[in-house]
Protein backbone atom coordinates (compact mmCIF):
# COMPACT_ATOMS: atom_id res chain seq x y z
CA UNK A 1 0.00 0.00 0.00
CA UNK A 2 1.32 3.43 -0.89
CA UNK A 3 1.06 6.48 1.29
CA UNK A 4 -0.93 8.83 -0.90
CA UNK A 5 -0.91 12.58 -1.06
CA UNK A 6 -4.17 14.45 -1.28
CA UNK A 7 -2.48 17.36 -2.99
CA UNK A 8 -0.08 16.16 -5.70
CA UNK A 9 0.95 19.70 -6.57
CA UNK A 10 3.93 21.04 -4.72
CA UNK A 11 4.76 17.68 -3.24
CA UNK A 12 8.13 17.43 -1.53
CA UNK A 13 10.20 14.31 -1.07
CA UNK A 14 12.69 16.07 1.20
CA UNK A 15 11.31 14.57 4.43
CA UNK A 16 11.63 11.08 2.96
CA UNK A 17 15.18 11.74 1.77
CA UNK A 18 16.47 13.39 4.93
CA UNK A 19 14.81 11.01 7.40
CA UNK A 20 15.93 8.00 5.37
CA UNK A 21 19.49 9.36 5.20
CA UNK A 22 19.52 9.94 8.96
CA UNK A 23 18.07 6.55 9.95
CA UNK A 24 20.23 4.67 7.43
CA UNK A 25 23.40 6.39 8.65
CA UNK A 26 22.68 5.69 12.33
CA UNK A 27 22.01 2.02 11.61
CA UNK A 28 24.77 1.33 9.10
CA UNK A 29 27.35 3.95 10.09
CA UNK A 30 26.75 4.24 13.81
CA UNK A 31 30.43 4.80 14.62
CA UNK A 32 30.84 7.32 11.78
CA UNK A 33 33.38 5.35 9.76
CA UNK A 34 32.16 6.95 6.52
CA UNK A 35 31.33 10.33 8.02
CA UNK A 36 27.64 10.30 7.08
CA UNK A 37 26.34 9.98 10.64
CA UNK A 38 26.93 13.63 11.42
CA UNK A 39 26.17 14.92 7.94
CA UNK A 40 22.70 13.38 8.10
CA UNK A 41 22.18 14.83 11.60
CA UNK A 42 23.21 18.29 10.38
CA UNK A 43 20.46 18.30 7.78
CA UNK A 44 17.80 17.31 10.31
CA UNK A 45 19.02 19.90 12.83
CA UNK A 46 18.73 22.57 10.13
CA UNK A 47 15.19 21.43 9.40
CA UNK A 48 14.33 21.55 13.11
CA UNK A 49 15.66 25.11 13.26
CA UNK A 50 13.70 26.00 10.13
CA UNK A 51 10.47 24.72 11.68
CA UNK A 52 11.33 26.55 14.89
CA UNK A 53 11.78 29.83 13.02
CA UNK A 54 8.37 29.24 11.47
CA UNK A 55 7.14 29.01 15.07
CA UNK A 56 5.48 25.71 14.20
CA UNK A 57 4.10 24.20 17.36
CA UNK A 58 4.56 20.60 18.33
CA UNK A 59 3.20 18.57 21.21
CA UNK A 60 4.65 19.51 24.60
CA UNK A 61 4.08 16.00 25.98
CA UNK A 62 7.62 14.92 25.22
CA UNK A 63 9.52 18.00 26.31
CA UNK A 64 10.24 16.63 29.78
CA UNK A 65 12.14 13.63 28.43
CA UNK A 66 13.69 15.67 25.59
CA UNK A 67 14.79 18.36 28.03
CA UNK A 68 16.22 15.74 30.37
CA UNK A 69 18.18 13.92 27.66
CA UNK A 70 19.63 16.84 25.72
CA UNK A 71 19.63 19.74 28.20
CA UNK A 72 19.73 18.74 31.87
CA UNK A 73 21.94 15.66 31.60
CA UNK A 74 24.57 17.16 29.25
CA UNK A 75 24.93 20.41 31.21
CA UNK A 76 24.96 18.70 34.59
CA UNK A 77 27.42 16.11 33.27
CA UNK A 78 29.71 18.87 32.04
CA UNK A 79 29.40 20.69 35.35
CA UNK A 80 30.35 17.65 37.42
CA UNK A 81 33.14 16.73 35.00
CA UNK A 82 34.57 20.25 35.10
CA UNK A 83 34.37 20.22 38.89
CA UNK A 84 36.37 16.99 39.15
CA UNK A 85 38.72 17.17 36.17
CA UNK A 86 39.88 19.14 33.15
CA UNK A 87 37.17 19.50 30.50
CA UNK A 88 39.82 19.94 27.80
CA UNK A 89 40.86 16.32 28.38
CA UNK A 90 37.33 14.97 28.03
CA UNK A 91 37.42 11.52 26.46
CA UNK A 92 33.88 10.25 27.09
CA UNK A 93 31.72 12.17 24.61
CA UNK A 94 29.06 9.51 23.99
CA UNK A 95 26.35 11.27 25.99
CA UNK A 96 27.08 14.64 24.37
CA UNK A 97 26.92 13.02 20.93
CA UNK A 98 23.69 11.29 21.88
CA UNK A 99 22.14 14.60 22.96
CA UNK A 100 22.97 16.33 19.67
CA UNK A 101 21.71 13.42 17.60
CA UNK A 102 18.54 13.14 19.66
CA UNK A 103 17.92 16.85 19.12
CA UNK A 104 17.89 16.12 15.38
CA UNK A 105 15.03 13.66 15.88
CA UNK A 106 12.75 16.50 16.96
CA UNK A 107 12.12 16.65 13.22
CA UNK A 108 10.14 13.43 13.65
CA UNK A 109 7.65 15.45 15.69
CA UNK A 110 6.46 17.61 12.79
CA UNK A 111 3.48 16.74 10.64
CA UNK A 112 3.41 13.08 9.68
CA UNK A 113 7.15 12.58 10.03
CA UNK A 114 6.72 10.26 13.02
CA UNK A 115 4.90 7.62 10.97
CA UNK A 116 7.42 8.03 8.20
CA UNK A 117 10.34 7.56 10.62
CA UNK A 118 8.86 4.28 11.90
CA UNK A 119 8.38 2.91 8.39
CA UNK A 120 11.90 3.92 7.36
CA UNK A 121 13.35 2.35 10.51
CA UNK A 122 11.55 -0.94 9.78
CA UNK A 123 12.74 -0.87 6.17
CA UNK A 124 16.40 -0.39 7.20
CA UNK A 125 16.21 -3.00 9.94
CA UNK A 126 14.76 -5.42 7.42
CA UNK A 127 17.79 -4.75 5.21
CA UNK A 128 20.03 -5.38 8.21
CA UNK A 129 18.37 -8.71 8.99
CA UNK A 130 18.70 -9.82 5.36
CA UNK A 131 22.37 -8.78 5.39
CA UNK A 132 23.10 -10.76 8.56
CA UNK A 133 21.45 -13.90 7.20
CA UNK A 134 23.21 -13.50 3.84
CA UNK A 135 26.65 -13.14 5.47
CA UNK A 136 26.03 -16.18 7.66
CA UNK A 137 24.86 -18.31 4.73
CA UNK A 138 27.70 -17.22 2.45
CA UNK A 139 30.23 -18.02 5.14
CA UNK A 140 28.65 -21.39 5.87
CA UNK A 141 28.41 -22.55 2.25
CA UNK A 142 31.32 -20.88 0.45
CA UNK A 143 33.59 -19.68 3.27
CA UNK A 144 32.97 -15.98 2.63
CA UNK A 145 34.62 -13.67 5.15
CA UNK A 146 33.02 -10.20 5.55
CA UNK A 147 36.32 -8.31 5.55
CA UNK A 148 34.70 -5.04 4.44
CA UNK A 149 32.35 -4.89 7.42
CA UNK A 150 34.85 -6.26 9.94
CA UNK A 151 37.67 -4.07 8.64
CA UNK A 152 35.54 -0.95 8.98
CA UNK A 153 34.44 -1.98 12.49
CA UNK A 154 30.79 -2.12 11.46
CA UNK A 155 30.41 -5.65 12.75
CA UNK A 156 32.05 -8.41 14.76
CA UNK A 157 32.37 -11.84 13.21
CA UNK A 158 33.69 -15.02 14.73
CA UNK A 159 32.86 -18.22 16.55
CA UNK A 160 30.85 -18.36 19.76
CA UNK A 161 30.95 -21.40 22.02
CA UNK A 162 28.56 -22.27 24.81
CA UNK A 163 28.75 -25.66 26.55
CA UNK A 164 30.39 -27.38 23.62
CA UNK A 165 27.98 -25.90 21.06
CA UNK A 166 29.74 -23.64 18.57
CA UNK A 167 28.35 -21.40 15.84
CA UNK A 168 29.47 -18.41 13.84
CA UNK A 169 28.09 -15.14 15.11
CA UNK A 170 27.36 -12.05 13.02
CA UNK A 171 27.03 -9.02 15.26
CA UNK A 172 26.51 -5.60 13.72
CA UNK A 173 26.77 -2.52 15.94
CA UNK A 174 23.07 -1.93 15.29
CA UNK A 175 21.97 -5.55 15.89
CA UNK A 176 20.22 -4.65 19.20
CA UNK A 177 17.72 -2.55 17.22
CA UNK A 178 16.45 -5.76 15.67
CA UNK A 179 14.38 -6.07 18.85
CA UNK A 180 12.12 -3.44 17.30
CA UNK A 181 11.82 -5.43 14.09
CA UNK A 182 11.10 -8.55 16.13
CA UNK A 183 8.31 -6.75 18.01
CA UNK A 184 6.90 -5.42 14.72
CA UNK A 185 6.89 -8.88 13.14
CA UNK A 186 5.38 -10.45 16.26
CA UNK A 187 2.61 -7.85 16.35
CA UNK A 188 1.93 -8.38 12.64
CA UNK A 189 1.62 -12.13 13.18
CA UNK A 190 -0.74 -11.62 16.11
CA UNK A 191 -2.97 -9.37 14.01
CA UNK A 192 -3.08 -11.65 10.97
CA UNK A 193 -1.15 -14.85 10.28
CA UNK A 194 0.32 -15.36 6.83
CA UNK A 195 3.16 -17.38 5.34
CA UNK A 196 5.10 -14.23 4.35
CA UNK A 197 4.78 -12.71 7.82
CA UNK A 198 5.87 -15.96 9.44
CA UNK A 199 8.85 -16.20 7.09
CA UNK A 200 9.96 -12.62 7.80
CA UNK A 201 9.50 -13.16 11.54
CA UNK A 202 11.71 -16.26 11.46
CA UNK A 203 14.38 -14.36 9.54
CA UNK A 204 14.34 -11.58 12.12
CA UNK A 205 14.56 -14.03 15.01
CA UNK A 206 17.43 -15.83 13.27
CA UNK A 207 19.29 -12.53 12.77
CA UNK A 208 18.85 -11.73 16.47
CA UNK A 209 20.02 -15.21 17.47
CA UNK A 210 23.10 -14.95 15.24
CA UNK A 211 24.28 -11.90 17.17
CA UNK A 212 25.80 -14.41 19.56
CA UNK A 213 25.15 -12.34 22.69
CA UNK A 214 23.32 -14.03 25.54
CA UNK A 215 20.75 -11.27 25.93
CA UNK A 216 19.79 -11.11 22.26
CA UNK A 217 19.65 -14.90 22.00
CA UNK A 218 17.17 -14.98 24.88
CA UNK A 219 15.08 -12.17 23.43
CA UNK A 220 15.09 -13.82 20.00
CA UNK A 221 13.44 -16.87 21.57
CA UNK A 222 11.06 -14.97 23.85
CA UNK A 223 10.08 -11.85 21.85
CA UNK A 224 6.92 -13.31 20.30
CA UNK A 225 5.62 -14.50 23.67
CA UNK A 226 6.56 -11.17 25.23
CA UNK A 227 4.63 -9.15 22.63
CA UNK A 228 1.70 -11.59 22.79
CA UNK A 229 1.63 -11.26 26.58
CA UNK A 230 1.71 -7.46 26.29
CA UNK A 231 -1.35 -7.21 24.05
CA UNK A 232 -3.22 -10.39 24.83
CA UNK A 233 -6.31 -11.03 26.88
CA UNK A 234 -6.06 -12.68 30.28
CA UNK A 235 -6.41 -16.07 28.60
CA UNK A 236 -3.58 -15.18 26.21
CA UNK A 237 -1.39 -13.99 29.08
CA UNK A 238 -1.94 -17.26 30.92
CA UNK A 239 -1.21 -19.24 27.75
CA UNK A 240 1.99 -17.28 27.07
CA UNK A 241 3.15 -17.71 30.66
CA UNK A 242 2.59 -21.47 30.52
CA UNK A 243 4.16 -21.70 27.04
CA UNK A 244 7.27 -19.79 28.14
CA UNK A 245 7.60 -21.95 31.24
CA UNK A 246 7.23 -25.24 29.35
CA UNK A 247 9.49 -24.10 26.50
CA UNK A 248 12.14 -22.96 28.95
CA UNK A 249 11.91 -26.18 30.96
CA UNK A 250 12.16 -28.36 27.82
CA UNK A 251 15.05 -26.30 26.46
CA UNK A 252 16.90 -26.56 29.75
CA UNK A 253 16.30 -30.30 29.79
CA UNK A 254 17.84 -30.67 26.33
CA UNK A 255 20.60 -28.06 26.58
CA UNK A 256 21.37 -27.69 30.28
CA UNK A 257 25.13 -27.64 29.65
CA UNK A 258 24.75 -24.85 27.11
CA UNK A 259 22.59 -22.82 29.49
CA UNK A 260 25.01 -23.27 32.39
CA UNK A 261 27.92 -22.26 30.15
CA UNK A 262 26.11 -19.13 28.97
CA UNK A 263 25.48 -17.95 32.52
CA UNK A 264 28.50 -19.41 34.24
CA UNK A 265 30.49 -17.39 36.72
CA UNK A 266 33.31 -17.16 34.16
CA UNK A 267 31.05 -15.59 31.52
CA UNK A 268 29.48 -13.19 34.01
CA UNK A 269 32.58 -12.51 36.10
CA UNK A 270 33.44 -9.16 34.50
CA UNK A 271 30.05 -7.58 35.06
CA UNK A 272 29.66 -9.05 38.54
CA UNK A 273 33.09 -7.78 39.58
CA UNK A 274 31.96 -4.23 38.84
CA UNK A 275 29.50 -4.36 41.74
CA UNK A 276 32.16 -4.13 44.44
CA UNK A 277 33.72 -1.22 42.57
CA UNK A 278 30.43 0.65 42.47
CA UNK A 279 29.99 -0.03 46.19
CA UNK A 280 33.33 1.67 46.89
CA UNK A 281 32.44 4.67 44.73
CA UNK A 282 28.99 5.07 46.27
CA UNK A 283 30.62 4.84 49.68
CA UNK A 284 31.70 8.43 49.08
CA UNK A 285 28.63 10.52 50.03
CA UNK A 286 29.50 13.28 47.53
CA UNK A 287 29.66 10.86 44.64
CA UNK A 288 26.56 9.05 45.87
CA UNK A 289 24.52 12.26 45.94
CA UNK A 290 25.99 14.26 43.06
CA UNK A 291 27.94 11.78 40.91
CA UNK A 292 31.42 11.81 39.42
CA UNK A 293 30.53 13.24 36.03
CA UNK A 294 32.23 11.94 32.90
CA UNK A 295 35.89 11.17 32.41
CA UNK A 296 36.31 9.49 35.81
CA UNK A 297 38.59 7.00 34.07
CA UNK A 298 41.21 9.78 34.01
CA UNK A 299 41.21 10.76 37.68
CA UNK A 300 39.13 8.48 39.96
CA UNK A 301 41.38 5.81 41.51
CA UNK A 302 38.35 3.71 42.49
CA UNK A 303 36.91 3.77 38.98
CA UNK A 304 40.28 3.18 37.32
CA UNK A 305 40.88 0.16 39.57
CA UNK A 306 37.40 -1.11 38.77
CA UNK A 307 38.09 -0.99 35.01
CA UNK A 308 41.60 -2.42 35.32
CA UNK A 309 40.46 -5.49 37.27
CA UNK A 310 38.49 -6.76 34.25
CA UNK A 311 40.84 -5.31 31.65
CA UNK A 312 38.31 -2.77 30.40
CA UNK A 313 40.21 -0.20 28.28
CA UNK A 314 37.11 1.98 27.88
CA UNK A 315 35.76 4.99 29.74
CA UNK A 316 32.72 3.34 31.34
CA UNK A 317 31.16 -0.03 32.12
CA UNK A 318 28.29 -1.84 30.40
CA UNK A 319 25.99 -1.55 33.44
CA UNK A 320 24.01 1.38 32.09
CA UNK A 321 21.74 2.20 35.01
CA UNK A 322 24.51 1.94 37.59
CA UNK A 323 26.56 4.17 35.31
CA UNK A 324 23.77 6.74 35.34
CA UNK A 325 23.94 6.78 39.13
CA UNK A 326 27.73 6.98 39.14
CA UNK A 327 27.83 9.86 36.67
CA UNK A 328 24.84 11.90 37.88
CA UNK A 329 24.47 10.72 41.47
CA UNK A 330 22.16 8.04 42.82
CA UNK A 331 19.07 10.29 43.23
CA UNK A 332 19.24 11.77 39.72
CA UNK A 333 20.29 8.47 38.18
CA UNK A 334 17.32 6.71 39.78
CA UNK A 335 14.93 9.41 38.53
CA UNK A 336 16.32 9.10 34.98
CA UNK A 337 15.94 5.32 35.09
CA UNK A 338 12.35 5.54 36.33
CA UNK A 339 11.47 8.08 33.63
CA UNK A 340 12.98 5.89 30.92
CA UNK A 341 11.08 2.81 32.09
CA UNK A 342 7.85 4.82 32.28
CA UNK A 343 7.98 5.62 28.56
CA UNK A 344 6.44 2.32 27.35
CA UNK A 345 3.42 2.95 29.57
CA UNK A 346 2.59 6.61 28.91
CA UNK A 347 0.76 8.51 26.17
CA UNK A 348 -1.49 7.20 23.45
CA UNK A 349 -0.10 6.95 19.92
CA UNK A 350 -1.80 5.35 16.95
CA UNK A 351 -3.06 1.80 17.40
CA UNK A 352 -1.08 0.31 14.52
CA UNK A 353 2.19 1.37 16.13
CA UNK A 354 1.52 0.07 19.66
CA UNK A 355 4.13 -2.64 19.15
CA UNK A 356 6.72 0.06 19.83
CA UNK A 357 5.83 -0.15 23.54
CA UNK A 358 7.01 -3.73 24.20
CA UNK A 359 9.88 -3.12 21.78
CA UNK A 360 11.19 -0.20 23.84
CA UNK A 361 10.59 -2.08 27.09
CA UNK A 362 12.69 -5.02 25.85
CA UNK A 363 15.35 -2.58 24.68
CA UNK A 364 15.47 -0.92 28.12
CA UNK A 365 15.89 -4.31 29.78
CA UNK A 366 18.66 -5.16 27.31
CA UNK A 367 20.52 -1.93 28.11
CA UNK A 368 20.79 -2.82 31.80
CA UNK A 369 23.94 -4.80 30.97
CA UNK A 370 24.86 -3.21 27.63
CA UNK A 371 25.74 0.41 26.71
CA UNK A 372 22.93 0.83 24.18
CA UNK A 373 21.25 4.06 25.32
CA UNK A 374 23.89 6.70 24.63
CA UNK A 375 24.65 5.50 21.13
CA UNK A 376 23.30 5.66 17.60
CA UNK A 377 21.06 2.73 18.51
CA UNK A 378 19.61 4.72 21.38
CA UNK A 379 19.06 7.74 19.15
CA UNK A 380 16.89 5.70 16.77
CA UNK A 381 15.09 3.85 19.58
CA UNK A 382 14.16 6.97 21.56
CA UNK A 383 13.76 9.33 18.61
CA UNK A 384 11.29 7.03 16.88
CA UNK A 385 9.45 6.20 20.10
CA UNK A 386 9.04 9.83 21.14
CA UNK A 387 7.70 10.49 17.65
CA UNK A 388 5.21 7.67 18.18
CA UNK A 389 3.93 9.35 21.35
CA UNK A 390 3.26 12.42 19.19
CA UNK A 391 1.06 10.49 16.75
CA UNK A 392 -2.64 11.27 16.72
CA UNK A 393 -5.44 10.49 14.30
CA UNK A 394 -5.42 14.11 13.24
CA UNK A 395 -1.82 13.99 12.06
CA UNK A 396 -1.59 11.84 8.96
CA UNK A 397 1.16 11.26 6.46
CA UNK A 398 -0.81 13.24 3.92
CA UNK A 399 -0.73 16.30 6.17
CA UNK A 400 -1.35 19.56 4.36
CA UNK A 401 2.00 20.83 5.64
CA UNK A 402 4.11 20.95 2.50
CA UNK A 403 7.07 19.51 4.37
CA UNK A 404 5.31 16.19 4.91
CA UNK A 405 3.19 15.82 1.81
CA UNK A 406 3.28 13.15 -0.83
CA UNK A 407 5.12 10.30 0.73
CA UNK A 408 5.06 7.48 -1.80
CA UNK A 409 6.77 4.94 0.37
CA UNK A 410 5.89 1.23 0.28
CA UNK A 411 4.45 -0.30 3.43
CA UNK A 412 7.30 -2.04 5.26
CA UNK A 413 7.50 -5.80 4.81
Image (tube, grey):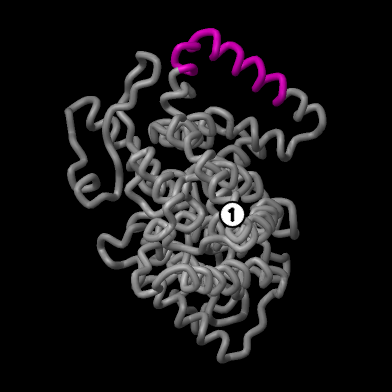
> Where is 306 relative to 85, above or below?
above
Which residues are drawn in magenta? 240-260
Asked if residue 199 shows in the view, the reply is yes
Residue at the spot 65% in from the left edge and 66% down from the top edge: 65
- Residue 85 horizontal side relative to residue 189, left or right: left
Binning the other alpha carbons within 10 Å of mark 1 as few (below 14), some (14 to 19) or many (20 upward) gives: few
- Residue 132 horizontal side relative to residue 12, left or right: left
- Residue 301 horizontal side relative to residue 143, left or right: right
Quadrant in which the N terminus appears? bottom right
Judge whether residue 257 is colored magenta: yes
Q: In x, y percent, where is residue 46?
A: 45, 82
Q: How many marks?
A: 1
Q: Quadrant of residue 131?
A: top left
- Residue 190 horizontal side relative to residue 151, left or right: right
Judge whether residue 162 is colored magenta: no
> Where is 325 relative to 192, above or below?
below
Residue at the spot 33% in from the left edge and 36% down from the top edge: 170
Which residue in the structure is indicated by mark 1? 284
Residue at the spot 52% in from the left edge and 32% down from the top edge: 198
Q: Main secondary structure of the magenta part?
A: helix
Q: Nearer the viewer, residue 298 or 65?
A: 298
- Under tag 1, what secondary structure? loop
Residue at the spot 52% in from the left edge and 61% down from the top edge: 292
> Where is 367 relative to 300, above or below?
above
Q: In x, y percent, where is residue 312?
A: 35, 44
Q: Quadrant of residue 287?
A: bottom right
Asked if residue 1 shows in the view, the reply is no
Amino acid sequence: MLLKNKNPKGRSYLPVIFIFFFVFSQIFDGINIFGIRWISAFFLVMLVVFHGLKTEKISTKNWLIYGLLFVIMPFYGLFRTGFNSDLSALSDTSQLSFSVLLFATIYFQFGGNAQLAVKIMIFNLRLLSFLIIAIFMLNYFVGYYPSFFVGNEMMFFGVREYGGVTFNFVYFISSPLLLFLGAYDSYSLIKRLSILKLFLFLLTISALFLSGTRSLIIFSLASFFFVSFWFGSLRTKIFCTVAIFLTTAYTLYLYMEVFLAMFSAANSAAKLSYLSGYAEIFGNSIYFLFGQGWNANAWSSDFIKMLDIVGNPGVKTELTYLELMRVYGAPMGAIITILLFSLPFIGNGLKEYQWLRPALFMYLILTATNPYIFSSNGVIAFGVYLGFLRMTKGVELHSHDASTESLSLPRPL
